[in-house]
Image (cartoon, helix red, strand yellow):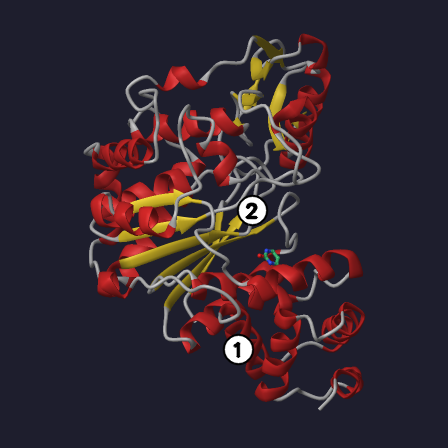
Amino acid sequence: MGMLDLIERKKRGDALSEHEIRSWIAGVSDGSAPDYQSSALLMAMTLRGLDAREIDALTDAMANSGERLDLSAYGDCSADKHSSGGVGDSTSFLVVPIVAACGMVVGKMSGRGLGHTGGTLDKIQAIRGVRTQLSKSEFYRQLDTVGAALAGQTGEICPADKKLYALRDVTGTVDCTGLIAASIMSKKLAAGARNIVLDVKCGRAAFMQRREDAAELARMMVGIGKRAGRNVRAVVTDMRAPLSRYVGNALEVYGAIRILRGEERGPLYDVAIELASNLLGMHGVSDARARAERAVESGAALERFDRLIRAQGATEDVCAQPQLLNKARCRQDVYAAEDGYVTDIDAMQIARYVCDIGGGRRKMDDAIDPYVGAELHVRVAQPIAKGERIATIYANDPSRIRADLMQHAVRIGRERTDPIRWIREIIES
Ligand code: URA
């Protein structure tokens, strides 16, 4: 059956068979399916949608298009997490050591930041000496010795997804829920963990802005994972304001370490505990939340994070001295221009500003400045007085400091609004 026939049938709204989808992905992998025909098929799929059988076949075919990690040695203990990406979203630095401290094994393969969302690899590399390009044997060895790793891809995972994603990016076919679900879950299935928690963001700085769309994507991904025999849960979380008080690569690691040291709490802690307790719960731990909280209180999670970064080459003791991460040459405080209540903190504006001063990249090969960023001193719904400090900007080039942009991002009004409900929904099936 030729590609043209698949395109025609999908254009009419027919469901493709498992065999047809597998042949197409084989063609994508070996180059025999031309990009123009794959693009047309992706557009027909975007317009007509995919049913569960098609999504499962696509996910499985992409998961099998490259290397797969074998975590079977860890039995039911292996864990993984995925975040659909946000601002100040550094939950991996908490969830990974928390669940590792509770006996699970977490080999998390992460990516770099692009656009307004930060990437775990960029953040952890703000710690001097830390390496993220681990070979497969280094990755497995670290799982044996530390129980946790935060690294880039160890081999070529899902090359067919990589090719298709590049096509989707330039053909207006990214925003198809079935294609997104298959793309994300193919990588999670290939990464091998038995227990997977998905943090699906909604709100202005999220990939899916409407909560219902995020929940639909979450349900689809949970379904794919379960049908493939994995334990999967999704947590839909709000991403209208930064999750952490800190935005910027080194600053976000600093904020996470402060939480692990018991020096701060807040929404980042709450969401991380929710994600960690879902992983522990899927593994059958009955007092999962209490165990996750105790891992932080007892210092066990901090100790695990310390071992993880040392195993990956850290040359500075940031767990004992987190202030070593604050290396920006200039700081400027920003003050409230009026009395009232904080009604909104615009994650998108703050992320764009941090990107503009060097903290993010517009193209994949841009260099980033790990030390620039912003620290927020206020939360939505709190009262505020004119002249009170609302934020601090960290920069290396004083001419790029824009207090007015931060003032604009932290909105103040006369009426008190409700605090943000960060955890919106837990999806188990
Ligand atoms: N992230 C992915 O990995 N794939 C998508 O399709 C969208 C977001």
**Is residue 74 or residue 344 the one in the foreground?**
74
Which residue is tagged 1? 56
Q: Residue at x 29, y 27 (%)?
A: 262
SS under mark 2: loop
Q: Is residue 118 above or below residue 338?
A: below
Which of the two marks, 1 or 2, is nearer to us in this view?
A: 1
Look at label 2 and name its amino acid: Gly
Mark 1 near ligand 1 (CB under 8 Å)?
no
Q: Position of residue 224 (x, y in %)?
A: 48, 73
Q: Position of residue 381 (x, y in %)?
A: 55, 31
**Is residue 374 or residue 45 the one in the foreground?**
45
Mark 2: few/some/many CA within 10 Å (<14, 14-19, 20+): many
Q: Position of residue 185 (x, y in %)?
A: 50, 65
Which residue is tagged 2? 85
Tell me, yes or no, if residue 208 can be seen here: yes
Query: Of callouts 1 and 2, which one flags the residue occurring earlier in the amino acid sequence?
Result: 1
Q: Residue at x 50, y 58 (%)?
A: 156
**Is residue 311 or residue 112 the one in the foreground?**
311
Q: Quadrant of ligand 1?
A: bottom right
**Is residue 214 or residue 152 the one in the foreground?**
152
Q: Is residue 229 above or below residue 295?
A: below
Q: CA distance from mark 1 to mark 2?
A: 23 Å
Say which quarter of the image contains residue 282: bottom left
Say which quarter of the image contains residue 12: bottom right
